[in-house]
Amino acid sequence: MSVVLRVVASLAGIIALGFVFGSAIQTLLLPRGVYSRISRFVFIITWQTLGLRLGRSPSFERRDRVYAYLGPVYLICLVASWLALLWLSFSAIFWSVTHESAGNAFITSSSALTTLGFVRPPGVGPQLVAALEAIGGLGLVALLISYLPALYTAFSRREAAVNKLASRAGSPPSGPALLSWSWRFDQFEDLTAVWRFWEDWFGELGETHTSFPVLASFRSSRPGQSWVTAAGAVLDAAAFRCGVVDAPRDIDAELCIRAGYQALREISDMLNITYDDNPKPDDPISLIRAEFDEACLFLEGAGVPLRLERDAAWKDFAGWRVNYDRVLVSLATVTMAPYAPWSSDRSVSRFRRPPMLFLRKHPRRSKEGAWD
């Protein structure tokens, strides 16, 4: 009976090792956002543990301070979980191959994992197992160390653009403010460079936030800013430029919108946010006509030339906005983005469920939008 138990323990340890290294490969090496069960479980526990610090009816400032730790704490807990499972798995294997007590097996595994070498298992086989455990533990730590520079480089590039937008679109940012600033300072013709810059930014956003899904939970360095609200402001400005401003057609603005909604949809796929793959131009959006008219009055006051056919302009603007309206508002909810007009101001203020809970193992492919 004891022999059978030791064989079962050894097999269980080997299977557990497969889960550990599979999780590490999927999370740190695989260039697409596929989260293992271990990663998902650790993220949920981290989210809920941080949520215990919020108390009842927390203010946004408190939620922002607490969940600013979510991404970094999650990565630390994830590696700690891998190492703990590695320790337990090799403890079971040591118990099987050395025929010692369970306590001695745990100590032997601890010695090998920490590479301290205070216990030397007897025999060539156990010593080989100890060497494999030491290599595995060091390998996991090395993978994390190599993973962090790429992660924080992507974060820094994302935040540099978000911070830069504040000087043009205000804080919180808005699309009409971006157009008004450009017209007031005689830089309306230079918006082409803005659209091209943000088209590239959206392309990089979709790539990095699907390769490193944890980036979505990394909050901006400044409490009042968010990559979601910045994306919404740029897309709304481009939609106004395409559908409302009385000026020749701007292909770069249209391409910016296309790149933007494709990136937001790819990220939404990772978070299992549902949306219409191919919306119709006249489908309802979260904005109402009164908000649109108020923005038009604001732009007219700044001197921006607008189309006289206001009904047709509203229809065209809504036709562009429908491509990203659902995913924008949903991402603002999931990330608990700070207040910004036309995005987070209409999201659910208290999102109680951890976003990574909804990660898809096999993201669906986004289709084209309503104006393609």
Image: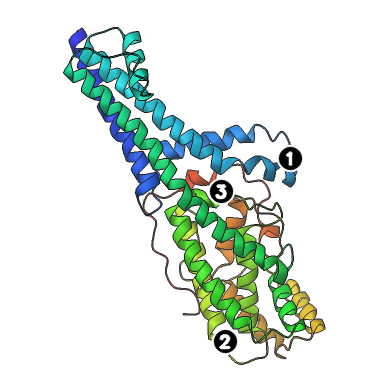
Cα–Cα span, label 1 and label 2: 44 Å
Identity of the amino acid at label 1? Pro
Along the viewing direction, whichever of 2 and 131 lies nearer the viewer:
131
Q: Are marks 2 and 3 in contact (CB under 8 Å)?
A: no
Disc 3 target residue? 217
Q: Position of residue 161 (x, y in %)?
A: 60, 65
Along the viewing direction, whichever of 310 and 180 lies nearer the viewer:
180
Identity of the amino acid at label 3? Ser
Q: Residues within 10 Å of mark 2 (few under 14, many from 20)?
A: some
Identity of the amino acid at label 2? Asp
Q: Mark 2 or mark 3: name the one nearer the start of the chain.
A: 3
Which residue is painted at 40% across and 29% down in the image?
83
Q: Mark 1 or mark 2: name the one nearer the start of the chain.
A: 1
Q: Which mark is residue 250?
A: 2
Quarter occupied by residue 55: top right
Q: Which mark is residue 58?
A: 1
Q: Eyeballing the image, is 147 above or below 242?
A: above
Q: Eyeballing the image, is 103 above or below 162?
A: above
Q: Residues within 10 Å of mark 1 (few under 14, many from 20)?
A: few
Q: Position of residue 4 (x, y in %)?
A: 19, 13
At numbered mark 3, what does the secondary structure look like: helix, strand or loop? helix
Cα–Cα span, label 3 and label 1: 19 Å
Image-based side of 67 in relation to 112, left or right: right
At numbered mark 1, what does the secondary structure look like: helix, strand or loop? loop
Q: Is residue 178 visible?
A: yes
Which residue is painted at 42% across and 41% down in the image?
144
Q: Which mark is residue 130?
A: none
Q: Is residue 269 visible?
A: no
Cα–Cα span, label 2 and label 3: 34 Å
